[in-house]
Amino acid sequence: MSKISFKAAASLAITLIFALSLGVLSACEKEGEKQQTANTKSSLDVIKERGVLRVAVFADKYPFGYKDSLGQVQGYDVYFAKRLAKELLGDENKIQYEFVDPAGRIPILESDRVDITLANFTITEERKQKVDFALPYLKTAIGIVSPQSALVKSIADLKGKKLLVSKGTTSEDFFRKNHPEVELLAFDQITEGYQALKDGRGAGFAQDNTEVLAWARKNAGFQVGIGDIGTVDGIGAAVKKGNTDLLNFINKTIEKLAAERFFHADFEATLRDAYGADANPEDLVVEGGKI
Amino acid sequence: MYEGIDGIRVIFEGINFQRLMVGLLVTLKIAAVSVAVSIPVGVLFGILMTSRKKWVRLLCYFYLDAIRIIPILVLLFVFYFEITRVFKIQWSGEFVAIIVFSMWGIAEMGDLTRGAIRSLPKHQIESALALGLSENAIHRHIIIPQITRRLIPPSINLITRMIKTTPLVALISVIEILKVGQQIIEYNLYRNSTASFWIYGFIFIVYFLLCYPIAEVSRRLEKRWG
């Protein structure tokens, strides 16, 4: 064996690793500078040059963004994303999907990993500080789904009980701000929230009314006791703050699509199956960005 | 709508099984690469922690405590979103996952190694020094052979912990087996009321098959060397 001691070898190895990572970092930084100069071009041209629209969608939120048994991305949001790709790039399949969780929707835009977040994104004042929202294409209020045997009909019914919510959603915000007396149990994943409700770990699960209505319809023994908490909110696509070119493009497309009642067609194609024959598209669909 | 035992078909519907296996590969890749980096580098790090130089020890403890105090989820977010925002580097989610899990593994493995070295009776090293053995020889013939045995049970524990922590990477858009499972469950919410039971049950068995053999190997090694 060599005369170098283990400790010396260890320090050498670790110094090397640090040096290497520093090298990688600085190399990447230079690349970043190049990217920045490219950013002075119109964001639409950047997408056209790339030839693919990068969109953040949900992969576990039926019927808005989900994967079917064949692994295909489907849903109301996805239907719209495909149309945007068709309008911009001439092919609805020129999309690169990134699958997000609710809490990742803003940072994924800020870190330039996608061009558009189209993931059932409710438009709020707070979020407007961080991203730019396009015109709404869907509307919603908060609903609470609970077991029929102990139906939650008003917020007062929640006194001394636990309410289940999803982290980073409008429902969580609303209850934290306006009803601090209600004890919240927050989950990272929507799936976990429903599982907790089934397991009886909370009196009810608060989510967008669209979401809970559909779920209650298919889960015997559960019902939406209140479906109009908070104000009626718009749901819209979001882009990185300051990406005006792309924002204007989305808004113009939405206005143009009103003539062909595109979002009604979207509703029939993707939501009808979930909400049933009785559902009234006017309760949810927004055409031309007018709530 | 499927119910009861019939619900098990959710695992094999369409390409669901294939999707779960692809997710498993992602889990395995992240865990295997991180473990492969963590064990050797962690042992070196542990030896450094016993250095006689104070500033070396201080640096090591600073790193160890930093990694221990910061939740892994925060590290994942910092490396995935913040570094990209500040430096404009776009590392893939999988790469970030491997970096963060390796950082964590190195810190933990280092601390285990430090503990193992400290647990050796001091007189062994002092006697060796008195006999005129070099530091190199002491490490090779006295310290390393003994700590290897002592390190096996805790490092197996660390490996299985790393495997079981991989689902966190779903939050930086890496789709591993548990996330695939959740996608399948969500799609079947209204189609198959028992989907979550079968999918979670299946994933439970997969994790068991993954972690049990590792534990079994460690048990045998312990018996043989014990």
Image: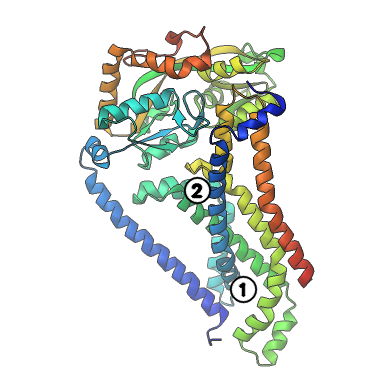
Q: Is residue A40 shown left or right of residue A82?
A: left
Along the line of sight, the residue nearer the viewer: B77 or A72: A72
Q: What residue do we see at 30% from left, 52% from top?
A: A32
Q: How many marks?
A: 2
Q: Nearer the viewer, residue B93 or B54?
A: B93
Residue A208 horizontal/vertical position (percent): 51, 20
* Left or right of residue B82, residue B126 in this image: right
Disc 2 on helix, strand or loop?
helix
Name the residue located 63 percent from the left edge and 22 percent from the top edge: A181
Which residue is outermost to the left? A41
Residue A116 position (above or below residue A224): below
Q: Quadrant of the C terminus of chain A?
A: top left
Task: Mark yes or no: residue A24 visible.
Answer: yes
Chain label for disc 1: B
- The residue type indicated by label 1 comes to Thr
Considering every residue shown, the one lying at the far bottom of the view is B132
Alpha-carbon span between mark 2 and mark 1? 29 Å
Q: Locate residue B1, reporting x and y percent.
A: 62, 20
- SS category of the residue bearing label 1: loop
Q: Is residue B62 visible?
A: no
The N terminus of chain A sits in image quarter: bottom right
Q: To which residue does mark 1 refer?
A: B50
Q: Residue at x 57, y 79 (%)?
A: A6
- What amino acid is labelled 2 in the image? Leu
Compared with residue B37, is residue A225 higher up or lower down, i.e. above or below?
above
Question: How would you rate the neighbour count of disc 2 (Cα within 10 Å): few for under 14, some for 14-19, many for 20 or more?
Answer: many
Residue A239 in picture, x, y percent from top left:
34, 32
**Number of the label disc, if any, that sits on residue B76:** 2
Residue A228 locus on image (x, y percent): 52, 12
Task: Please report whichever mark, 2 or 1, sits nearer to the chain's N-terminal start.
Answer: 1
